[in-house]
Image (cartoon, rainbow, N blue to C red):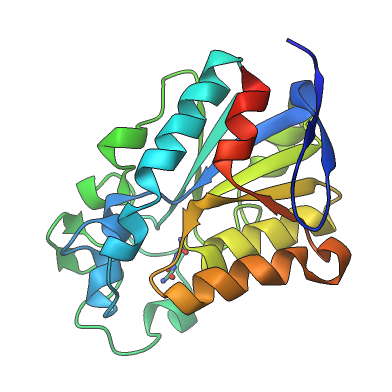
Amino acid sequence: MPTTVILDALPGPIELDLDQTALIIIDMQRDFLLPGGFGETLGNDVSQLQRVVEPLAALLDAARAVGMLVIHTREGHLPDLSDCPPAKLNRGQPSKRIGDPGAFGRILIRGEYGHDIIDELAPLDTEVVIDKPGKGAFYATELSKVLADNEITQLLVTGVTTEVCVHTTTREANDRGFECVVVSDCVGSYFPDFQRVGLEMIAAQGGIFGWTAPGTAIIPLLN
Ligand code: TIU
């Protein structure tokens, strides 16, 4: 396997060193993706996120096959909610709030069924799982250390939702010096307009905080 590949991306090609690249899968949790979960209680159409699952499973398979570092994240909180600021807990008026009982256990609480990752993308025992209290994956987590320990400099960013946790994490990573490729068919938004514009915002202005490319362009480079 050649270590370096050229990915056809927006706003232009990017050279990826596969030995220094990680796949990060953001918040593909039941509470966001399944009917009855937190995402739906916020009034969202969860079917918009389901389209991500198949392409992301294919990319995950390819990444695993070449031994790429795979990092999964989960947004959620301690059972006593001590890591959930009131500003987040009380935001808006959903019919259910973080920590309330939901269809899949307490909403977005660590250890609950709904907080965990969907079966199709279940982490392997050898893969990293980052539990994060915020939208970004760097805030109050060990992610920086994991990336440094593995000498990672480039990230393939996937998961949900495009304009919230994917954007926040990509912006955080970009500020920390990582080159980020947001994988366009492996990220999803409840809102089709936000999906389109969210992707455009990343690659605009010469790639102001990253690149975008579909998984279908990445997978052949991993074979
Ligand atoms: N609501 C929404 O779009 N997203 C979140 O609350 N979290 C993530 O994006 N993971």
Query: Would you say residue 106 is visible in this rendering?
Result: yes
On the image, which quarter does residue 147 sit in? Answer: top right
The residue at the point 63 percent across, 38 percent down is: 217
The residue at the point 60 percent across, 75 percent down is: 197
Is residue 90 toward the left or the right of residue 16 in the image?
left
Residue 55 position in % (x across, y down):
43, 40
| Placement of 1 over or under 32, stated as above or below | above
Which quadrant of the picture is home to ligand 1? bottom left
Which of 168/132 is in front?
168
The residue at the point 17 percent across, 62 percent down is: 35
Residue 170 position in % (x across, y down):
68, 57
Question: If the image is split into quadrants, where does the C terminus sit?
Answer: top right
Query: Would you say residue 68 is visible in this rendering?
Result: no
| Placement of 108 over or under 70, stated as above or below | below
Which residue is the extreme one toward the top?
1
Which of 219/120 is in front?
219
Is residue 33 toward the left or the right of residue 147 in the image?
left
Residue 137 position in % (x across, y down):
60, 53
Question: If the image is split into quadrants, where does the N terminus sit?
Answer: top right
Which residue is the extreme one toward the left?
103
Is residue 22 toward the left or the right of residue 133 in the image?
right
Which of 25/139 is in front?
25
